Amino acid sequence: MTADPLRHYREVWACDFEFHAPPGEIPTPICMVAREYRSGRLIRLWSDQLAELRQPPFPVDAGSLFVAYYASAEFGCFLSLGWPMPVRILDLFTEFRCLTNGLTVPCGNGLLGALAYYGLGAIGAAEKADMRDLAIRGGPFSPREQAALLDYCASDVDSLCRLLPAMLPEIDAPRALLRGRYMAAVASMEHTGTPIDVEILGTLRTNWARIKGRLTREIDRNYGVYVASGRYRVNDETAFGREVAAIAAEVGCHPFYVREAIKYVHTSRREAVEEIRWADMAARTKTGLTAKAIARWENAGRDYSSWPQLDVMARELAGEYPALGIGRGYSSDDGYDDTDHAALLWDRLRTPTDPLPRVTDPEILDEAAYQVDGAPAELPDEAPLSFSVQRFSAWLIREGIPWPRLPSGALALDDDSFREMAKVFPRVAPLRELRHTLGEMRLFENLAVGSDGRNRCLLSPFRARSGRNQPSNARFIFGPSCWLRSLIQPAPGQAVAYVDWSQQEFGIAAALSGDVAMMDAYASGDPYLRFAVQAGAVPPDATKTSHPAQRELFKICALGVSYGMQAESLAKRIDQPPCVARELLRLHRQTYPTFWRWSQAAVDRAMLHGTLRTVFGWTIYIAAGANPRSLANFPMQANGADMLRLACCLATERGIRVCAPVHDALLVEGPAGKIDQVVTDTQAAMAQASRVVLGGFELRSDAKIVRHPERYMDPRGKRMWETVVEILEDLEYERREQEAEDSTW
């Protein structure tokens, strides 16, 4: 830039807060430091001084520029203090992301990383981490700690003042202000948070170890692909395993209990036999008598009485090994008894010693079957279960589902494969949701819910390459499995509404490409059916009801095109031969040629010039070897992100309580009696945002309203949630039954 972009502002204030914010809570400001960029005027305030102010100690009108690094953190403190938001905001974090998106950033995207990128020194990373840990710890702070935190805060402000002139020549000022404006909206949404049913959340956290075992077994009833693992596993591929399975099926209990009973009976009998075998071995060793030796002796016409020293040895053995059953031998109290020990020992050793019992001996199996009569048909809740690839493969064969495979030939078991196949074969969806749930090791532990029952976490704006938010999947309520979203429940007298754009990516592609036929399809209200009509695949009067299968094929094709889906992938997606997929893609190219030329031109430009930009200037730098398909999708995704950000700005600035942005939707909240108006206002903001981004082309939006005591329900997780609730009800019933039983004693 040749002209000074700061010339429009009377003052330019760089600002930084230190604050304390436990998971799910709004931030508590600890201190603030601000410096006016031109004059160098410095303001240092501790928490008690901040609390006395009703507005910032510097101007925040349109004549003043507010500069920060990751400004949503500062604005969270503004909201906690009840201060008005600045009108003009320059966030050097968002600009650094925009200037380096797609490039390698050696030291990361934080303030230290940006300073290093521009060759500017800063405090050490270790010192910064120590100060951050001190702020996270929270007060009270000693005078020395207060001074250290203020100095640390001031060092960040001074770093901002050094970073600003280094970055300023590269910054697209008008669009940078829009990104800064969005950071204020982010702070507002993070401050509002999403209402959570904390009672059920607490119950889930307490009982999850028991719930997930029952949940797995309940969902698996329709699949039979989970098997017991660890000590609970019974291998039914062995002869013993088959015996166990047969008894279990006959008795009606789980094979684990049969196996444990067999082990108990076998061990008991083995211990009894082992004592006798040990006594027999000792007797044979001492006397030299074996079955063959006795037979030879008797065949020679002799008997036990003539075996050397047998009378003395037998008497001694009787005393040492009562298990021989030949009398007591010698007793210090009674002396020798008059039993003919030698004769009894001779008879005992005449036949071979009984072998140890085998686990498959009929007597042992019969005794075990008797013992497990009435045992449970299910394992205990804590019993671990594991996914069996072999059983899953057998289920796929039974269901006739062609599953994608790895180059090695093995089944592709990653979550992306399950998600895509669940779209084609809905019966896969519950299994995918279960696997996704079980794969989240800390499903509830990190979900950030504050003391007021609201989910709050960093929305992490501009973290994705498309410029979309990228909040923590573990902390954000919309991050984990879909069924957990049913924890969203408005408070009494309140309601929430999920307002999302209809076919947003299709509409963006139509408007930005200028494809008249595509825009006509979007304007019809059902672009997928209209695509089928335009392609001549269905009659002009076709409806969703009259041609559902054709509409679904053209819908999948239209959505797949935006992701650069090729014929082979599309064929798998629609479960049709590749020739059908190729024909669908041909029809799309034929029907929307302007779109295809525009899309290819975007890819060509990216490969030739190394960049792609959105309407609002969000930029991606193209590395060598970039995937053309992902480049083709960038305009839809990144301009969709532009649109969502503007809608969030408009909505929050108009006083709408936005709980969270979710890809192409907003979750908003309001009094139950006024939620319809809240939805109307939200849709107006979203419509305006679409017109601004798309040059006057307006996208529709749909809304789903949930009033207390109802809860939000994602259709994809409905069955899982209902199953979990049933399990919770069973556990509660069992708890009460146990309490009643205990009270009778």
Image (cartoon, rainbow, N blue to C red):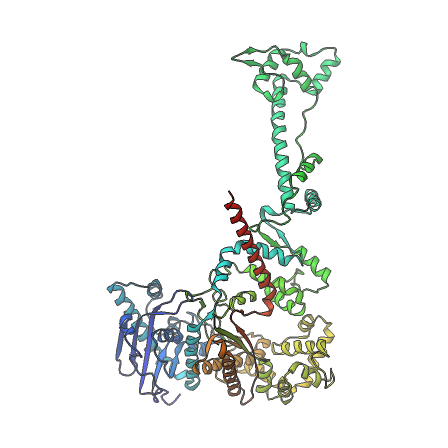
The picture places residue 724, in percent across and down from the top left corner, at 57, 60
Task: Tell me the quarter of the picture where residue 122 sits.
Answer: bottom left
Residue at (64%, 67%) from the top-left corner? 422
Residue 121 visible in the shown view: no
Residue 685 visible in the shown view: yes
Of residues 339 and 613, which is closer to you in this image?
339
The picture places residue 592, in percent across and down from the top left corner, at 66, 85
In this rendering, the answer to whether 213 lies above or below 478 is above
* Furthest residue in direction front, as rendered: 744
The picture places residue 386, in percent across and down from the top left corner, at 60, 54
Task: Tell me the quarter of the picture where residue 213 sits.
Answer: bottom right
The picture places residue 531, in percent across and down from the top left corner, at 68, 83
Residue at (72%, 86%) from the top-left corner? 540
Task: Tell me the quarter of the picture where residue 311 sits.
Answer: top right
Numbered disc total: 0
* Furthest residue in direction left, as rendered: 143
Q: Is residue 575 left or right of residue 707?
A: right
In this rendering, the answer to whether 272 lies above or below 151 is above
In this rendering, the answer to whether 3 lies above or below 435 is below
**Quarter of the image that includes the N terminus:** bottom left
